[in-house]
Amino acid sequence: MARGASVGLMLVILLTSMTGCTAVTDGITGNSSSEEISVPTWELGDYWLYTFSTPDYSDDTTKLVVATTDIEEDGTAYMLAISSIGEARRHAVLNHNPFLGRITHDQLSPFENGEAKDVLDFPLKKNKAWSFSLFENDWNAVVSSVDSSIASIRATASDGSSIDYIFDGNIAFFSSFIWTDSEGVVQLKMKNADNGVGHTGDVYFVRGGDLYSNNWDNSGPDAEFVDTFFVSDHPKDGEWNEMIYFLDASCGGGSTITLTLRDHTSVSALERFWGPGAEETGTLGTIPYPSQEYTLTVTFTGDTYLRILLAGGITYSWNL
């Protein structure tokens, strides 16, 4: 009897020990359905260094910095600014970085067209699903795994586009964010390279608004193109500080491009010429405070390509 009781007690102890190990292992590997990540709290000067790649340029490094914590949206949103005025202007004209500007406290949601977009839905938990809109598309998101404060999320759209992103609770933001369009082209790739606290110095945000865009791929006879567009104020923030332009141009042998942008008084605001064999990619520049009406004239000879994007910009800056 004593021997049987001893064996039974050993079995109980062994089973209890095994059960405890299984529970702990589930928590560590992220197999537990109860593991979740809560929304972090950002502080002034927190920063994240990212490499950005888009079809327009690759491996551009950008530092995002928390510029304010309790001012935007009646105190319910942060302002995520950038350490380079040039990069702030690039965002204003290309609008490639959705996480620059206001970010809500409750879900770390960026704003697009004045509306908060719930790219995240805290608390993050395995198999949690929700919907949001971004990049002018509707997405269905699912948390595929949560493992040691790291959540892997995949969002898909009806046209076959996808966003694959990883939220890392250890850095309180994304470790990667990759948007692939329906043709399989990566439209945006963000990769975290560094992060920290207590950034000091000037940071910037340029509130942008699309004014004009066009592109020409001319392989036929010589041609001239004339277009007029009107520049109105920002719908909420008033007059623009400047106009920001982004250019791509290329000419074949014996080909030329001439570009002239004039305001309503016929004063030339921008003049450019590209000769035979010339090529220019990703040029960013500014034009002083825009007038109300502009006329763009472009002439082509031979085999040429030109793309131009124009945006209004209002610059905000903070010294941390």
Image: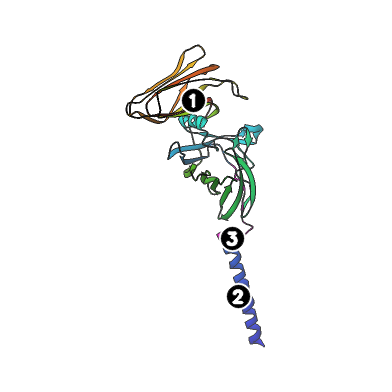
Residue placed most toward the observer, 194 or 142: 142
Label 3 sits on what residue type? Asn
Residue in view at x 47 percent, y 32 percent: 87
Q: Which segment is the magenta one?
A: 26-41
- Cα distance in 3D space between marks 1 and 3: 49 Å
Is residue 319 visible in this depiction of the protein?
Answer: no
For marks 1 and 3 on the same chain, the one whose residue lies earlier in the sequence: 3
Residue tagged 1: 244
User: Given the image, on which type of amino acid does mark 2 rest?
Assistant: Leu
Q: Which residue is mark 3?
A: 31
Q: CA distance from mark 3 to mark 2?
A: 23 Å
Q: In the image, residue 270 lies at what x, y percent?
A: 44, 19
Tag 2 residue: 14
Q: Mark 2 packing: few (<14 Cα in 10 Å), some, or many (20+)?
A: few
Mark 2, secondary structure of its residue: helix
Q: Out of 109 and 105, give the one closest to the viewer.
A: 109
Vertical comparison of 232 with 193: above or below: above
Pointers 1 and 2 in contact (CB under 8 A)? no
Q: Residue at x 64, y 52 (%)?
A: 128
Q: Position of residue 183 (x, y in %)?
A: 50, 44
Of residues 311 and 302, which is closer to you in this image?
Answer: 302
Taking the magenta stretch, the answer to whether it contains residue 34 is yes
